[in-house]
Image: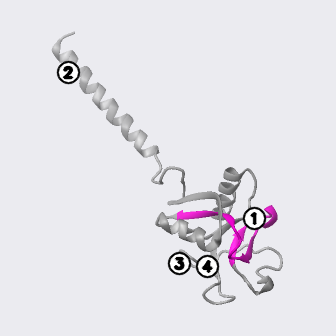
Amino acid sequence: MTRSTQMASGLLFLLLLGIGGNIYCEAQSNCPLDWTEYDNNCYQYEDQEKTWYDAEAFCKHDDGHLTSIQNTDQYNFIRDLIYKGAGFNQKSWVGGTNLNMDGQWEWTDGTPFTFNNWGPGEPNNQGGNEHCMDINLREQDYVNDEECTQELAFVCITP
């Protein structure tokens, strides 16, 4: 093999390596390991059960919050994420709360509270202590107000 053939082969190898590397990098998620990317955010389902307060603190540790829900597509993505992680529609915390003002629901990440899919008769503040939002009550397709001290699985979101 001549020197010019060796150089051409080497350049071709580097070119292909560069193209392949770029394709590989483009396919990679911007999310940390064990997180799932959806609509420019990263999500993590945690099956380790915590109170709503401890779940929010856990999410903040990763510069996130308990997830908000802005639309039906995101809601369905979150339910699917829980199902894939738990093997069923496990009751889980999300970031809705009315702790600051009873009856005034908000998301912990500060996004507008426009989407809701409350179950029949919800939110009902049963017993006067239900100020935090869960999803999949009795594996059903809606959200519910719940006592914040219950220990549930949860879903975090980071931008």
Which x, y percent locates residue 159? 48, 64
**Residue 110: assigned label:** 3
The magenta-colored residue range is 132-157
Dot 3: what SS? Answer: loop
Query: CA–CA distance between discs 4 and 1?
Result: 19 Å
Q: Residue at x 47, y 53 (%)?
A: 32
Which quadrant of the structure image shows residue 111?
bottom right
In this image, 86 relative to 155: left or right?
right
Nearer to us: label 3 or label 4:
3
Dot 1: what SS? Answer: loop
| Residue type pointed to by label 4 | Phe
Q: The N terminus lies in which quarter of the figure?
A: top left
Nearer to us: label 4 or label 1:
1
**Residue 144: assigned label:** none
Read off the residue under disc 4. 113
In this image, 78 relative to 139: left or right?
left
Read off the residue under disc 1. 136
Which quadrant of the structure image shows residue 107?
bottom right
Mark found first going from the N terminus, 4 or 2: 2
In this image, 42 relative to 80: left or right?
left
**Residue 7: assigned label:** 2
